Amino acid sequence: MKVTVKYFASIREAIGVPCEALETQATTLSVLRDELIALSADHADGLARGKLVRLALNQVMVNESVALTDGAEVAFFPPVTGG
């Protein structure tokens, strides 16, 4: 399936691109994250399993167990704090 992946803040800085269109066999966001980590050292650095990463699917905050659908927009970003 085809998905659009967007990266924000420090994750975008680590990976070096704001977004990419990908073909994937992933069935969940967790599997997609693992596929991305395997793409390059930059992806592995930005999306490392030891880092807290927030996800959105089609602009709705979700957890990694959510099913991925064809044509989806997935966003990865670090947690933020406000005050």
Image (tube, helix red, strand yellow):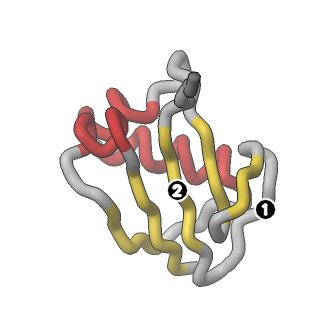
The answer to whether 67 appears left or right of 24 in the picture is right
Q: Amino acid at mark 2?
A: Ala
- Which numbered marker is on residue 16? none
- The residue that appears at 56% across and 30% down in the rendered structure is 79
The image quadrant where one finds the C terminus is top right
In the rendered image, residue 78, in percent from the top left (x then y), is placed at 49, 33
- The residue that appears at 54% across and 45% down in the rendered structure is 33
Q: Mark 2: which secondary structure? A: strand
Q: Quadrant of residue 22?
A: bottom left
In the rendered image, residue 41, in percent from the top left (x then y), is placed at 25, 33
- The residue that appears at 54% across and 41% down in the rendered structure is 34
Q: Closest to the observer: 33 or 8? A: 8
The answer to whether 45 appears left or right of 71 in the picture is left
Q: Closest to the observer: 20 or 61? A: 61
* Residue to which mark 2 is pinned: 75
Q: Amino acid at mark 1?
A: Ala
Q: Quadrant of residue 19?
A: bottom left
Q: Closest to the observer: 9 or 23? A: 9
In the rendered image, residue 4, in percent from the top left (x then y), is placed at 46, 72
* Residue to which mark 1 is pinned: 67
Disc 2 to disc 1, C-alpha distance: 14 Å
In the rendered image, residue 11, in percent from the top left (x then y), is placed at 36, 38
Q: Residue furthest left?
A: 16
- The residue that appears at 52% across and 68% down in the rendered structure is 24
Q: Mark 1: which secondary structure? A: loop
